[in-house]
């Protein structure tokens, strides 16, 4: 019995989980303690497609890689079951258009809060609400960065890598 893992469906499930958390009544609100609510959640890598200025803070979910291992002996490749680890990245972007003082970086603060809120929502959904083929998932790490836009505008970014253990 041949099967494929629904990668796009998996990204959509994560987008749905985060979208559901993007309200003030959610158990773990995505924008909790941030200065501005998350305006946009997508399933694409924004490297080549930048958002409009009204769509920040934003969250983007995209695939990085999938390791695959055949788990059993089978007549052929089509009938063999697969075990793997899917690496997805979740990119959070916060835009700040000026620096109010030299004592606080609001963009960095908001980006760090956003990435912590994303992690909290993922931890609350260890198998992505029983998504088909997902055994478990766990956030692995977060890298933070900065991107200058104009003299008085800059973006703070956080990229979370999550490992999703899959069997299909």
Image (cartoon, grey):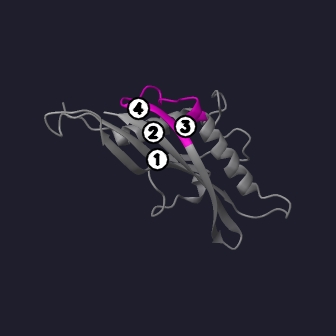
Q: Disc 2 to disc 1, how far (Cα)? A: 8 Å
Whichever of labels 3 and 2 marks the residue nearer the N terminus, that label is 3
Q: Is residue 97 visible?
A: yes
Whichever of labels 2 and 1 marks the residue nearer the N terminus, that label is 1
Q: Which residue lies under the disc numbered 3? A: 18
Which range of residues does the magenta coloring cover? 121-139
Q: Tell me whether the residue at label 2 lies in contact with that at label 1, contact meaning CB atoms closer than 8 angstroms.
A: yes
Which residue is painted at 59% across and 55% down in the image?
54
Q: Residues within 10 Å of mark 4 (few under 14, many from 20)?
A: many
Q: Which residue lies under the disc numbered 4? A: 134
Q: Which residue lies under the disc numbered 1? A: 88
Residue 157 among those drawn in magenta: no
Q: Tell me whether the residue at label 4 lies in contact with that at label 2, contact meaning CB atoms closer than 8 angstroms.
A: yes
> Residue 156 versus residue 125: which sits nearer the camera?
125
Which residue is painted at 64% across and 27% down in the image?
27
Q: Residue furthest front?
A: 73
Q: Residue furthest bottom?
A: 151
Q: Which residue lies under the disc numbered 2? A: 164
Quarter occupied by residue 85: top left
Q: Disc 3 to disc 4, how far (Cα)? A: 17 Å
């Amino acid at each position: 019995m041949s099967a494929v893992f629904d990668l796009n469906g998996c990204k959509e499930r994560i987008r749905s989980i985060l979208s559901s958390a993007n309200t003030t009544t959610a158990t773990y609100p995505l924008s909790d303690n941030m200065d501005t609510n998350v305006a946009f959640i997508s399933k694409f890598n924004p490297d080549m497609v930048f958002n409009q200025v009204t769509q920040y803070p934003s969250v983007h979910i995209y695939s990085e890689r999938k390791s695959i291992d055949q788990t059993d002996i089978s007549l052929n490749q089509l009938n063999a079951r697969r075990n793997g680890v899917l690496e997805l990245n979740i990119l959070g972007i916060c835009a700040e258009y000026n620096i109010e003082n030299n004592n606080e970086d609001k963009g960095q603060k908001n980006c760090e809060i956003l990435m912590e809120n994303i992690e909290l929502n993922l931890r609350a959904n260890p198998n992505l609400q029983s998504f088909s083929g997902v055994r478990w998932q766990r956030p692995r790490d977060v890298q933070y960065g900065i991107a200058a836009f104009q003299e008085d505008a800059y973006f703070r970014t956080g990229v979370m890598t999550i490992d999703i253990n899959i069997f299909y």
